[in-house]
Image: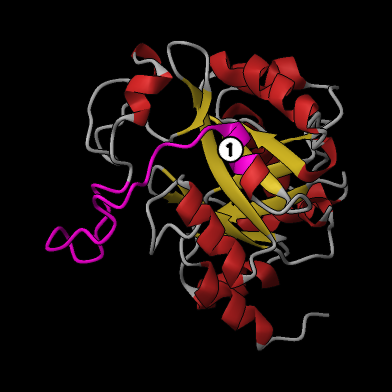
């Protein structure tokens, strides 16, 4: 899988083609695929009746016509809301995706609609969704094309040793900082990938040092969210593998102009 190849430079659509379409929707993901991304990234949670669905926030207020917590509403209740209602390209002057039938998709719908070989990074937003995601991955037979990540260690811990790649939790990344900077051996990783931002709480992370340190353990590094092609080039020069972008077209165009050694 390209997402685990230490010599690859994959461009990954962040929640699809988020700069131009409503995030975590089938429409956004399909736009990213049409652009030629190497993989897509999206977030999953559970409805109150146990349906695995795509949503980043704990509530639906920011991205839909509805309100309230995801975990307190049934899927049919969540499905009734317009998932394109809040998307704007001009700070609220117009809403080009409103009333176009965009809905919150289920994980199964997304997997069925996307190319069967497309690699995925799936972000677990809550430990409560871990068992359902595990079952869905097995049901679709997609163990070899997915990385499951989560900020909380409790999200991915139950999934260790289940036959698919996992991303490091935030505490795992913190434990890398000192040995990476001091060129000391890192703790033996249980994960296969880092999916991390270039900054944390306003403080730049030592990306080059981290990428160099984990590479010796066959761990790949994917950075989010990078929308500046020049920044992507610097990160690739620093030894990272994947660029996770809201605007994957711009990153793909920049990559096409460079011959990596």
Q: Could you tell me residue 261's position as x and y percent?
A: 83, 80
In this image, 220 relative to 87: left or right? right
* Quadrant of residue 151 within the rendered picture: top right
Q: Is residue 241 visible?
A: yes
Comparing 134 with 232, the one in front is: 134
Inspect the magenta stretch and tell me whether residue 15 lies in it: no
- As drawn, 99 above or below 88: above
- Reading the image, the residue beneath label 1 is 109
- Is 99 left, or right, of 29 in this rendering? left
Q: In this view, does 214 lie above or below 259?
A: above
| Colour scheme of the rendered structure | secondary structure
Residue 94 among those drawn in magenta: yes
Residue 81 location (% of width, % of height): 28, 33
User: In the rendering, at what x and y percent does residue 241 appear?
Assistant: 72, 60
Secondary structure beneath disc 1?
A: helix
- Relative to 149, does residue 114 appear above or below in the rendering? below
Q: Nearest the camera: 183 or 171?
A: 171
Residue 124 location, quadrant: top right
Residue at 51%, 76% in the rendered image:
250
Q: How many marks?
A: 1
> Which residue is depicted at the point 25% across and 22% down?
68
Residue 39 coordinates in the image, percent (x, y)? 67, 56
Q: Which of 217 and 1 is in front in this view?
A: 1
Is residue 58 at all visible to an observer of this figure?
Answer: no
Residue beneath the point at 65% across and 51% down: 114
Q: Which residue lies furthest to the left in this view?
A: 93
- Categorize mark 1 by other alpha carbons within 10 Å: few (<14), some (14-19), many (20+): few
Which region of the structure is painted magenta? 84-111
Q: Main secondary structure of the magenta part?
A: loop
Q: Residue at x 85, y 22 (%)?
A: 161
């Amino acid at each position: 899988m390209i997402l685990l190849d230490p010599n690859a430079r994959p461009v990954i659509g962040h929640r699809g083609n988020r700069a131009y379409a409503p995030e975590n929707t089938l429409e956004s993901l399909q736009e990213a695929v049409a652009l030629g991304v190497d993989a897509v990234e999206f977030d999953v949670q559970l409805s109150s009746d146990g349906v695995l669905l795509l949503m980043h926030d704990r509530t639906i207020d920011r991205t839909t016509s509805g309100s309230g917590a995801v975990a307190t509403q049934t899927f049919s209740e969540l499905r009734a809301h317009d998932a394109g209602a809040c998307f704007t390209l001009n700070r609220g002057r117009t809403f080009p995706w409103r009333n176009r039938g965009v809905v919150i998709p289920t994980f199964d719908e997304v997997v069925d609609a996307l190319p069967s070989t497309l690699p995925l990074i799936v972000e677990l937003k809550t430990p409560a969704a871990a068992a359902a995601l595990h079952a869905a991955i097995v049901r679709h037979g997609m163990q070899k094309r997915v990385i499951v990540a989560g900020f909380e260690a409790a999200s991915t811990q139950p999934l260790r040793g289940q036959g698919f790649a996992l991303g490091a939790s935030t505490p795992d990344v913190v434990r890398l900082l000192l040995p990476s900077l001091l060129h000391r051996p890192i703790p033996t990783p249980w994960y296969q990938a880092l999916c991390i931002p270039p900054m944390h709480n306003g403080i730049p992370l030592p990306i080059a040092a981290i990428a160099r340190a984990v590479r010796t353990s066959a761990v790949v590094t994917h950075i989010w969210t990078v929308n500046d092609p020049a920044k992507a080039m610097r990160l690739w020069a620093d030894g990272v593998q994947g660029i996770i972008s809201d605007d994957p077209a711009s990153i793909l165009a920049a990559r096409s102009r460079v011959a990596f050694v």
